Image: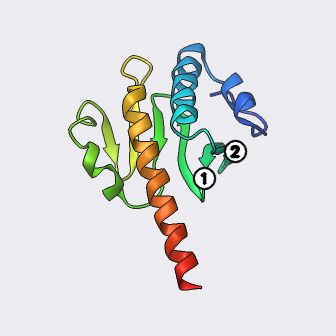
Amino acid sequence: MKKGAPANDVDSYLATLPDDQRLTLEKIRKAIKAAAPKAEEAISYRIPVFKYHGPLVFFAAFVNHCSLFVPGKEAILKPFRSELKPFKTSGATIHFSPENPLPASLVKKIVKARISANERRGNLQRKRR
């Protein structure tokens, strides 16, 4: 990624990336949007995030890989363990590359799981009031 001023929006963030990473993350973005059409895009911690009742997922490009960050405990990824075998994971972060991208179908499943978790958390908070 090129160094410089932080991006103000996701399009600006993606525009700074090498073509292979940009194309890979654009596909990730499209899959997230398909799974979470009501989610809001933003930049947080200098990287793209999708929010719906709180953060759903973040994604970013680094020198040697791309990452999908799944907020919360790594337990959220347990149901996807077999599908994640081809990828390096660290906690609730998935590392991938343009040569070995995350499948859109897997991204959609993870995002839908996060939507459910955020909605459950929101419902619990409302019940406590």
What's the amino acid at mark 1?
Tyr
Q: Position of residue 62 (x, y in %)?
A: 53, 33
The circle on residue 43 is 2
Q: Residue at x 25, y 35 (%)?
A: 83
Residue closest to the far bottom: 129
Disc nearest the viewer among 1 and 2:
1
- Res 106 → quadrant: top left
Relative to the observer, which residue lies in front, 73 or 37?
A: 37
Q: Secondary structure at mark 2?
A: strand
Q: Most extreme residue toward the top, as rendered? A: 19
- Circle 1 — which element? loop
Given residues 110 and 91, the one toward you in this image is 110
- Crowding at mark 1 (Cα within 10 Å: few <14, some 14-19, many 20+): some
Give residue 77's position: percent from left, percent from top: 32, 49
* Residue at image mark 1: 52
Instruction: Residue 37: name its quadrant.
Output: top right
